[in-house]
Image: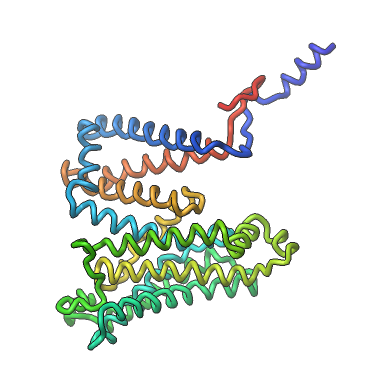
Amino acid sequence: MQNNNKTVHSGHEPLIRIVKRDAIPVWKTICIYALAIVLALVVCGFLIYAIVGLNPIRVYISMAKGAFGSEKRIWVTLRDTMMLLCIGIGLAPAFKMRFWNIGAEGQILAGGLASAACMLYLSKGMPNGLMLVIMFVLSALAGALWGLLPALFKARWNTNETLFTLMMNYVAIQLTSFFVAKWEHPFGSNSVGIINQSTKIGWFPQILGQNYLLNVILVLTLAALMYCYLKYSKQGYEISVVGESQNTARYAGIRVGEVFIRTMLLSGAICGVAGFLAVAGASHTISVDTAGGQGFTAIIVAWLSKFNTGIMILVSMLLVFLDKGALEIASAYNLNSFASQMITGIILFFILGCEFFIRYRIIFRGTHKEG
């Protein structure tokens, strides 16, 4: 009878079950990510050889040269990594409380506009150090105000923050277009041009002979501060509780609306600082392309790192490396941009896909071992 019961029970048990993991060791997470990258490179290698007949090893070497092939390229890669990391840091607190801030692009443009306005209107007789401080503060305020509006509506009327912040991006783009036309130089160029090219007021100074070292110092400082804020502060704890359950947060006496507003002020401010970095520490101009889609790319950075700003450094570096590498192989082997971007897309697909195996485990019939 027992055997018959077991047989019946076995017959009703599915062949494959997917079960959510309670926890996974860090070493196993790293191994899963490493295996995903290796598999992605193998798949890309087959496709590269099948489609264009190139040696995939040589293609991968070219990708490395594109990002790290010279001292200048290394510093440009670091500059772009810091920009992407800064935006990811800004998104981290909002995403951790499940407030889907898709408006980083607009907050970057708001901060960039504030920085450009300072360079255009306040540069006469202003020491560069004081100018940079003013630009930093006003850019953060501009980004914070741009993030405040959707937070207020969410707190008061429970509006959809995803749509609200997304629509704010388009408002910021049109506002930037207006000021680009207003500040156009030279006339008829439909661009602002390089601001203060002769005086370099509002430009990041060289440190130890490097143009972008200040970018690295500022963003890594923000990363350390945000890590401590989210992990050790009372406000960071409230963000975690609200992210887990708003009802639980209210039961614990946390004012959820205030947490929304406070956190979006912080999130918007840091994205505004990214606009400051773009204008003062990179392009020295402003345009509708200043954000360059990085506000959306940073969502991947924040999500993959699980809002850990230390891991964000590695993820940001990987994404920038893939971007630089794709441009290099397109140039070196006369490939169109679609072929090079396909490689980037496959690698990202495998990295994002491996999240499934980190979050869930597969159990086959008759066993409780992980698959």
Spot occupied by residue 122 in the image (x, y as percentages of width and height) = 28, 86
Place residue 17 in its image quadrant.
top right
Taking the spot 20% from the left edge, 76% from the top edge, the residue there is: 200
**Render colour scheme:** rainbow
Vertical placement of 191 versus 227: above or below?
A: below
Where is residue 224 shown, x and y percent of the image? 44, 58
In this view, 60 is above or below 224: above
How many marks the image carries: the answer is: 0
- Residue 5 as seen in the image, left or right of residue 119: right
Q: 344 or 307: which is nearer to us?
A: 307
Q: Residue at x 62, y 27 (%)?
A: 363
Residue 99 visible in the snapshot? yes
| Residue 190 appears in the rendering | no
Q: Residue furthest front?
A: 208
Name the residue furthest right: 1
Horizontally, is 172 left or right of 196 in the view? right
Q: Quadrant of the N terminus?
A: top right
State the residue at coordinates (20%, 78%): 196
Q: Position of residue 320 (x, y in %)?
A: 32, 51
Locate residue 217, reporting x and y percent.
Answer: 33, 62
Image quadrant where one finds the C terminus: top right
Which image quadrant is residue 8 in? top right
Residue 44, above or below 81: above
